[in-house]
Amino acid sequence: MAEPLPQGGVIGILGGGQLGRMLSVAASRLGLRCHIFEPGAHPPAGHVADGVTTAPYEDAEALRAFGEAVDVITYEFENVPTSALDLLESLAPIRPGREALRISQDRITEKDFLSGLGLAVAPYAQVDDLSSLHAALDQIGTPSILKTRRFGYDGKGQSRLAGTEDASSAIEAIAGAPAVLEGFVAFEREISVIAARSVDGSTACFTPGENVHAEGILRTTTVPASIDDGTQAAAVDIATTILEALDYVGVLGVELFVTSEGLLVNEIAPRVHNSGHWTQDGCAIDQFEQHIRAVAGWPLGDPARHSDVMMQNLIGDDMDSVPALAADGRAALHLYGKAETKPGRKMGHVNHVAGT
Amino acid sequence: MAEPLPQGGVIGILGGGQLGRMLSVAASRLGLRCHIFEPGAHPPAGHVADGVTTAPYEDAEALRAFGEAVDVITYEFENVPTSALDLLESLAPIRPGREALRISQDRITEKDFLSGLGLAVAPYAQVDDLSSLHAALDQIGTPSILKTRRFGYDGKGQSRLAGTEDASSAIEAIAGAPAVLEGFVAFEREISVIAARSVDGSTACFTPGENVHAEGILRTTTVPASIDDGTQAAAVDIATTILEALDYVGVLGVELFVTSEGLLVNEIAPRVHNSGHWTQDGCAIDQFEQHIRAVAGWPLGDPARHSDVMMQNLIGDDMDSVPALAADGRAALHLYGKAETKPGRKMGHVNHVAGT
């Protein structure tokens, strides 16, 4: 697919959650259609998609029909099974490419990759069992965090260690899965860069946002972040370095720690990212459209910010505040249409737009 | 339906064109779903809707199933057949209400209504045949415009008269349909107000935009309009007067002529309006979400403008400029996904956002 995807072209999206939902809406603005592949019934993205396939990632026949029905394939989460990608890659281009997925699916591979680019990361060591955890603790010390190498999100698959006496319970908490021990970073703040790269290699980064997490889940992103111009430029440089090293196509989320000694890369996500939701109400072209433009072979949009924004996630019972938020005529709501509210579940977000 | 429509609620939309498409996207932001009723196959709105019924407005069974599947009904065009509304109104609330439809479906009824509110309109007279056209010409003179009373849009069903000698050809041009002769207004500019009223009677108007038409079709809307504060306030007053007289719920488009003697109402449209498309990139809450909020019984959004915008329609071959517009990273594209480009057909629009 060397030419830009024409009007009526179909983008296949693996995953039907809120990110797929907002990608599908963005695609519609460009006259493109989306087809969702999602194992779960009634996916939020299905409410605004042209087509939905409900099937497990192990269903080769469903995958093949999906791959043949679309012009290009993207995804809303990085843990797409390798076997599904093996089957799909002969049917349509997969963007971002498989190297970005391979790296971001495994925390050790990711940290090795980032270190190899000369980028600073937290101290880390591989942990496969209790004895290698003790060895890792000797090297890294405490406080530290044990994280599963794969399938972690929103603070799941993580256990904090205050001292070596927590070793056994930490291994238990992650069910003995292959893991990485990360040294705790005394950061001043966490920021993220939502970066994009097009098929022709041009790049564009939105203004870095400042993130606040609680219980491992993003709560707010405030843009601009409280950082000086030099830090902002350094953050953009890091994101651009990663994009180019991966020959990346699409939007990439890069989480960074701001420390007294400079920036550390926390993690990368090869997709649109929760900390980029502010762009929906802060920029003429948001991260979702930026991603669609990139994977469809279109030119990137200008990431200039027209408004400052504070994005607040609506998690679980936060949905009780929707009537009050709806009555605040300046709060831009983005609700995901999920059938059931659960504790810790992302149900929506709200962008508080300043300066109007 | 006294309570606001809850998460997962379904809005039925009569008509599946670009307005229905953008309404459906806006509804998704509020966690609501849309079901489209449209006689034509492959409607643009269907790409981003939760449900689509393809059936003629005469299909009582399809209408009934549609009415039973939705919580509230709205529409994207004012020429919905009365028989369909008769059937639907017992199944779900229709918003905006039928009085607004009745008035806006007929140019004479509309002008009588507006005049009755004390609002200025162009001189007009009813025309049923050649002899009543001659009587109307005696009263109104030329230049003037003969317009069909019903079913006109985008300059269709209209004929201009430079002198009385054009009478016969004008009657022929509109195929002898019931009509109105309107005196030509020497206006300085045309503006429009996109006004909204909620179930609880509160109102909100977006900044008036300035419209340029060619061949009866809107080409551009520029916001803000080049008018003084007094004219802007008068325009908003007129729109609010109309909203209240109709006990209106939803978004109403009001087209006005600015003349040396003040404002004249050109026409009203009981729906989201092409001249309000700029709000998608100029306001935190756009006209589509404003309409959905109103018909769903939610509070209205703040119509404050964060950016100045020039909206340009992409009509027919204007689509040839899409690659150049896509390469202009500051141009916010909104394409309708229509399968076929035809002369005079609205294929999309672009918002040029200033001040970023």
Image (cartoon, coloured by chain):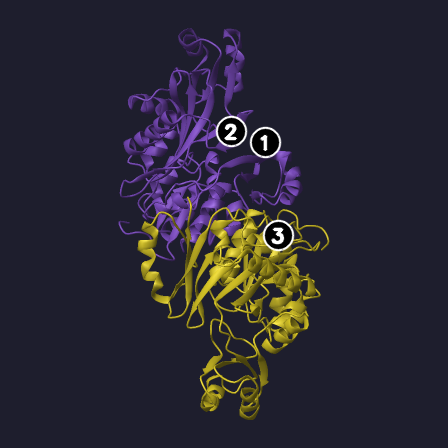
Chain colours: A yellow, B purple
Q: From the image, tell me which residue sits under label 3.
A: A293
Q: Which residue sits at x=55%, y=64%? A: A76
Q: Which of marks 2 and 1 is nearer the N terminus?
A: 2
Compared to residue B321, the image places residue A73 above or below, namely below
Residue A96 screen position, x and y as percent: 64, 62
Q: From the image, tell me which residue sits under label 1.
A: B344
| Chain ID, mark 3 | A
* C-alpha separation, residue under disc 1 versus residue under disc 3: 27 Å
Q: Tell me, yes or no, whether the two marked residues, 2 and 1, touch with CB atoms within 8 Å.
A: yes
Q: Quadrant of residue B312?
A: top right
Question: Residue reaching furthest bottom?
Answer: A131
Residue B89 screen position, x and y as percent: 32, 43
Is B51 in front, or is B114? B114
Callout 1 amino acid: Gly
Per the rendering, the mark at residue B154 is 2
Q: Does residue B230 appear to the left or right of A172 in the view shown?
A: left
Q: Which residue sits at x=33%, y=36%? A: B98
Q: Does residue B279 appear to the left or right of A237 in the view shown?
A: left
* C-alpha separation, residue under disc 2 versus residue under disc 1: 9 Å
Compared to residue B203, the image places residue A4 above or below, namely below
